[in-house]
């Protein structure tokens, strides 16, 4: 856990405790209500500030239906990658593996990819989750071909079973800002495809990476 999050958590607990003392000292104060009750229903009492803070925290921390998407990455996968950074050159193809594991009570999935790139051993790691507060999927990617951490965010289309993510980063070859769009399609419980598109300044896209994965 990051230090900032630990500090925030400790502060929240302290705030709840202090709020309890304050609330106890104001016993007998009139209780306010929130919103208009439905016909025939009694008015609902408003949550105290400390109870509201606890409710917010619980909402933010509890895995829900959106986290079920993460389960699609769990397990051992055999992968085949096709990379074409330069459209004037033939695509480079290689085989590899991917191993996904749900962590922290299913709140995130950690995936390690191994293979080759440009004839060199390649290893990359993805940490993917669903942010209950931001209401979107978020991920971080790192690999042994660079020192940057690339942050993606996006959404899941239930109809097409596609996880669509986007990222902004600095291109390590041009040292200029760049954009990318990634689409993971879950064809079945044992097959999925990952596609990455380079997004040009004018909005045009070019497919640069395709990975097909089959559960092994």
Image (tube, helix red, strand yellow):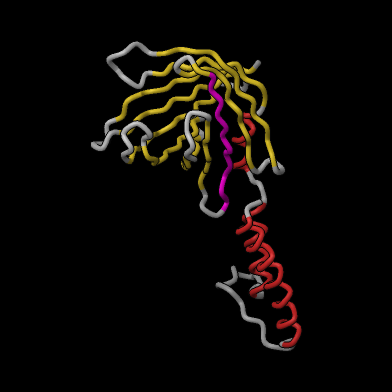
65 left or right of 195 in image: right
Magenta highlight range = 121-132
Instruction: From this view, report whether residue 21 is shown above or below residue 16.
Output: below
Location of the C terminus (image quadrant): top right
168 left or right of 111 in image: left
Q: Tell me which residue sits at (49%, 20%) in the image.
A: 211
Residue 131 is covered by the magenta coloring:
yes
Instruction: From this view, report whether residue 70 is shown above or below residue 3.
Output: above
211 left or right of 127 in image: left
Magenta span: predominant SS is: strand
Q: Residue 176 location, x and y as percent?
A: 31, 39
210 left or right of 129 in image: left
Q: Tell me which residue sits at (37%, 18%) in the image.
A: 84
Instruction: From this view, report whether residue 145 is shown above or below residue 64.
Output: above
Residue 215 is covered by the magenta coloring:
no
Q: Tell me which residue sits at (50%, 26%) in the image.
A: 185
Q: Residue 10 location, x and y as percent?
A: 69, 65
Q: Please identify the quarter of the rendering in which residue 192 is found.
A: top right
């Amino acid at each position: 856990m990051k230090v900032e999050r630990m500090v925030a958590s400790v502060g929240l607990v302290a705030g709840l405790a202090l709020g309890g003392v304050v609330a106890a000292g104001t016993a007998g104060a009139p209780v306010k209500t929130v919103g208009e009750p439905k016909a025939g229903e009694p008015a609902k009492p408003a949550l105290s500030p400390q109870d509201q803070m606890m409710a917010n925290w619980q909402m933010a921390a509890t895995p829900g239906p959106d986290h079920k998407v993460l389960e699609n990455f769990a397990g051992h996968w055999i992968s085949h990658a096709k990379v074409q950074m330069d459209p004037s050159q033939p695509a480079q193809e290689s085989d590899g593996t991917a191993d996904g594991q749900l962590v922290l009570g299913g709140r995130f999935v950690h995936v390690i990819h191994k293979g080759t790139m440009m004839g060199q051993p390649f290893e990359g790691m993805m940490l993917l989750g669903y942010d209950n507060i931001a209401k979107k999927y978020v991920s971080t990617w790192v690999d042994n071909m660079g020192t940057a951490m690339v942050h993606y965010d996006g959404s899941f289309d239930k109809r097409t079973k596609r996880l669509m993510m986007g990222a902004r980063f600095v291109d390590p070859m041009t040292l200029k800002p760049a954009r990318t769009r990634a689409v993971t399609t879950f064809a079945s419980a044992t097959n999925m495809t990952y596609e990455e598109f380079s997004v040009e300044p004018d909005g045009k896209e070019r497919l640069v990476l395709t990975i097909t994965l089959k559960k092994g």
